[in-house]
């Protein structure tokens, strides 16, 4: 059902070998994804693409913090502690 809502995005994701999951996340103002870690025995790269990015949206991986910018990717190893927030 979700693929039918975004057919071009679904087709692009399905064309990338090795993709395990794909999702859209919406962080409303004040929302936060709490700090968490990936599974140490299961290395995985995460790739986040900013679509609509207010100026106070951030991702922190380990000690590094980056702001999301529209149309830009942030790719990171999900094993270190990471979190995200909007303002």
Image (cartoon, rainbow, N blue to C red):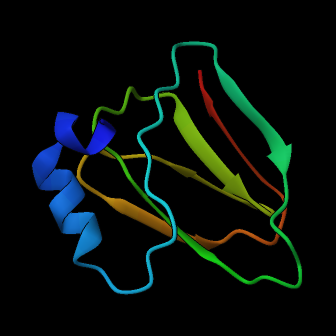
Q: Nearer the viewer, residue 54 or 11?
A: 11
> For the view shown, which residue lies furthest in the left direction?
8
Residue sitting at 69 percent across and 52 percent down?
Answer: 60
Q: Quadrant of the N terminus?
A: top left
Residue sitting at 41 percent across and 40 percent down?
Answer: 24
Q: Determine whether 52 is above or below 47 in the image.
A: above
Could you tell whether 40 is left or right of 4 in the image?
Answer: right
> Which percent across, then down, holds residue 22?
43, 56
Could you tell whether 28 is left or right of 34 in the image?
Answer: left
> Which percent across, then down, holds residue 64?
70, 62
Q: Quadrant of residue 10?
A: bottom left
Q: Quadrant of the C terminus?
A: top right
Residue sitting at 46 percent across and 27 percent down?
Answer: 26
Q: Quadrant of residue 14?
A: bottom left
> For the view shown, which residue lies furthest in the right direction?
40
Q: Nearer the viewer, residue 20 or 58?
A: 20
> Which percent across, then down, holds residue 9?
19, 53
Q: Determine whether 60 is above or below 17 in the image.
A: above
Q: Quadrant of residue 46?
A: bottom right
Q: Nearer the viewer, residue 48 or 11?
A: 11
Q: Nearer the viewer, residue 36 or 12?
A: 12
Please tell me how many numbered marks the rendered image carries. Answer: 0
> For the view shown, which residue lies furthest in the front direction?
1
Residue sitting at 29 percent across and 32 percent down?
Answer: 52
Q: Determine whether 59 is above or below 1 in the image.
A: below
> Which percent across, then down, holds residue 27?
52, 25
């Amino acid at each position: 059902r979700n693929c039918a809502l975004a057919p071009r995005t679904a087709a692009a994701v399905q064309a990338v070998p090795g993709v395990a999951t794909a999702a859209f996340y919406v962080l409303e103002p004040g929302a936060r994804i709490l700090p968490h870690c990936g599974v140490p025995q299961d290395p995985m790269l995460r790739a986040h693409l900013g679509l609509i990015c207010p100026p106070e949206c951030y991702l922190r991986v380990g000690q590094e913090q980056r702001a999301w910018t529209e149309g830009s990717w942030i790719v990171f190893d999900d094993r270190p502690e990471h979190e995200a927030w909007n303002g």
